[in-house]
Amino acid sequence: MRVCILGSCVSRDIFNEKSKETIDIVLYAARTSIGSIFSSQPFDDVYSKNLSSAFQARLVAMDIEKRLTSVLTTIDADVILLDLVDERFNLLVMPDQSRCTLSSELIAAGGSEHPGATIVPSGSPEFMMFWENGLVRLLQLLKDRGLLSRVLVNTVFYQPATESGERFSANWVGRCNEMLSKMYDILRGSLAASQFLEYGNLLTCPDDHQWGKAPFHFSRASQDFALGRIREMEGGVRS
């Protein structure tokens, strides 16, 4: 089974060591806002080389140089897993409206100080305009390739606290969840109800999560539930 992940560690963490025997992750594109994918290249990539992690450098370079567009025109997958958690990052926008994702990695590499660039806050009206325009192009590309029915939206929401009750910032959680709700509603206008992976009350945030405490670092139980739904979708593709 071939899986393409357009999203964050929330989706990548679903696939554990055991699942590697039957699931091939053909693409993992993180730290890229949908509002950035189809932009022209905003500036030369002089930043990714500043990152010691080859993985992080690759993600930053892919976003700045807009490599994902060409990858999406050729990649094949049984499931295209889409999650919107990385839409929490702002956009870095040039005067000609070309842009990239102002991820924590790009900030660490010095990109937030790029000459002439302005920051468009995540969830703002301008941000949502870029996001909706990018989404239209993404869905059309997948439709043209006969892949739209293979999209599965990982419909997560930020949680207010860890499993032990340690609270996250209520303002941040509320703001991010409001944006996610708007985005999911927009997606529901183009996708079937069966293309939304919804968890009910299963989403919890362990205090001992491998990546640390965060309102979007979820439990193994919820990840196993998601894996089951993904395998069900594979059956539909092959039938």
Image (spheres, rainbow, N blue to C red):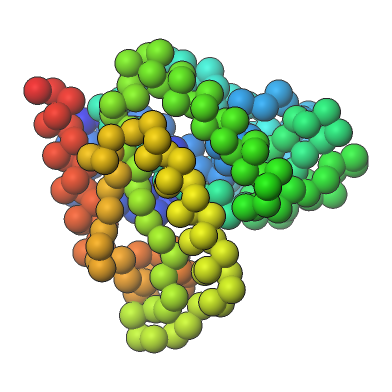
Q: Residue at x 34, y 24 (%)?
A: 148
Please identify the residue farthest to the right as the structure is shown.
Answer: 115
Q: Residue at x 25, y 62 (%)?
A: 200
**Does residue 63 lie above or below 40 as drawn?**
below
On the question of residue 49 being in view, the answer is: no
**Does residue 160 lie above or below 26 as drawn?**
below
Please identify the residue farthest to the bottom as the structure is shown.
Answer: 165
Q: Residue at x 75, y 43 (%)?
A: 92
The quadrant of the rendering that contains the C terminus is top left
Please identify the residue farthest to the left as the structure is shown.
Answer: 239
The residue lying toward the viewer, choosing from 59 and 55, is 59
In the rendered picture of this protein, how many numbered marks are placed on residues? 0
The residue lying toward the viewer, choosing from 18 and 137, is 137
Tell me where residue 38 appears, x and y as whole percent.
Answer: 61, 26
Residue 234 lies in what quarter of the image?
Answer: top left
Compared across the picture, whether 186 is left or right of 206 comes to right
Q: Residue at x 42, y 47 (%)?
A: 184
Compared across the picture, whether 39 is left or right of 225 comes to right
Tell me where residue 193 appears, x and y as whole percent.
Answer: 26, 41
Tell me where residue 22 appears, x and y as whole percent.
Answer: 17, 36
**Does residue 77 lie above or below 29 as drawn?**
above
